[in-house]
Image: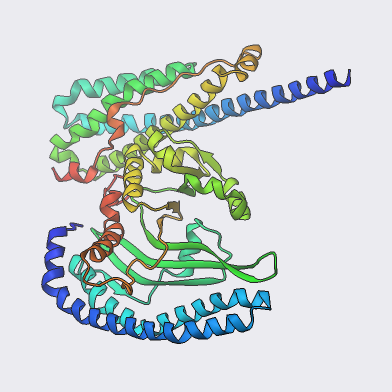
Amino acid sequence: MMDFLLIAAVIVFIGVLLYNTLVSRRNQCDNIYASIDALLKKRYNLIPNLVTLMKESMHYEKSLLEKVTELRAKAMQPHLTPEEKIAIADELTQPLHNLMVSVENYPELKANEQIMQLMRALNEIEEQIAAARRAYNQAVTDYNNARQMFPSSLIAGWFSFKPKMLFTIPEHERNNIDIEKLLKS
Amino acid sequence: MTFNRSELLDYYYRDLYPELELLEKERKEILKKLKFAILVIAPFALVLMFKLSNENNLAVEIPIVAISIFSLVAVWLSRDYKRTFKKRIVSRLISKIAPSLRYDSSGKIPESIFRMSALFEDDFSRYEGGDLIEGEIDGIPIKASYLRVQKSYRDSNGRKRERTIFSGIFIVTEFHKRFRHTTRVVPDISEKYLGLFGEWIQKLAAQKLVRMDSPAFEKEFKVYSDDSIEAHYLLTPNIMERLVKMKKRANAPLYISFRLRKLFIAIEKSSDPFKPSLFRSLLDIEIFKRYMENLNLILGIVETLNLDRKIWSKE
């Protein structure tokens, strides 16, 4: 009887440990997600000013500016699920990147200090978002692995730990923009 | 910073070689004196060992004492030679590569900067160094020197011993991004020394271990940071790739910390990187190449880690 109790105690102890690991990994994902959410808000706050200032000069980039504005409006809708937020943020990354690169073709924009200040702020936020995405993906991978691997997969199943979605990391984020080069060109 | 190897080799044969020949003569003189010192010390030690062979403890310690005396004599005899070598060769080599840099053979990175890096335990008893290189490379301020930091302790027999906390090249420079927290990058092997480093590892462990998204990088390093997003912000895929390459080129353990707006890099080396060789010919091109390699590690840091890259936020 004692043996049985001892084995049961060990099993419960291991179960608790596995459960706690899963919880801490899920919390880690949620914490990083909260930071991404804050960074995305900063990003969305910058966009209207930037678009207004750029609209005057960027005649050939009208559709790009419209796309950015449209996606921003989409992102500002209330009651979006985290998955929807991630999808919109992903979709917006490429047009924003293109916008930053296309500034190159407009010397008058490069001479405008107000625009340059906004671009600097946007670039820093974009780099932070890129970093946060990578940190989030790493945390999600760790969490998903724990969810799927035996024996923690049993606990995950019993307590319905749901899988989490990864951000897609665009290829250009592997190579950040060299601003120096961009401004000189 | 352009580091043209063939141009430097030309410089070596054209301008430095005559100086090296003079120094080589001096080195041979020192060797002669050292041989003489062996002839004096060795028989004396042997006689003493023979006489004290009944007293076990003393007999064992005599060779250690003899080697220590010999080392002291070697250091004393080669003092001027070392100084002259650094003044005439290392100093000229550095000003040839980067005329704006200042070199001070006896200067070293201040203790406060070593502590500021938070890379190693700061409770040390001996802090030595040399070969301070200071100035700007491609507009980025840089300070580097050789450091040897030791801590004394008593072994199980109560005897005083010294343990090396760090020995190697220590570099402090600026990083092109703003950051608020501390992020440390240490060799993965540090885990093996858990027992030895006790307290320090505990302190390090107080920070969160951050898993990075590069398998090649993860194989070489462990990252500890107060903020995992900031760690990813600083260690971009590009920087991680460059650090792995740097580690391979240095072929030595590498420690990096981002702290208080500075970037600290420590490259472990068992001895002074610009020490003139005593037992090998100074005219040996391989030795010169080793100095160049060490200089390249220090002066090439801005280019290696792309530190002069400007981003919008920090100008």
The image shows residue A69 at horizontal and vertical percentages of 30, 22
What kind of colouring is applied to the model shown? rainbow
- The one nearer the camera, B25 or B11, is B25
Name the outermost residue toward the right: A1
Q: Quadrant of residue B299?
A: bottom left
Q: Is B252 on the left or on the right of A99, as rendered? A: right
Viewer can see residue B236: yes
Residue A111 is at least partly visible in this image? no
> Based on the displayed image, in which of its 4 quarters is residue B197 positioned?
bottom right
Number of numbered callouts drawn: 0
Percent x, y of residue B232: 42, 38
Residue B236 or residue A83, whichever sits in front = B236
Residue B204 pos. (x, y %): 57, 49
Relative to B174, residue A94 above or below: above
Quadrant where the image shows the N terminus of chain B? bottom left
What residue sits 24% from the left and 42% below the top? Answer: A178
Please tell me whether residue B201 is drawn above or below residue A104 in the rendered image.
below
Q: Residue at x 21, y 43 (%)?
A: A112
User: What residue lies at 53% left-to-right and 67% top-to-bottom?
Assistant: B150
- Expressed as whole percent of the image width and height from the top left, the position of residue B291 reads 27, 64
Image position of B222 (left or right of A87): right
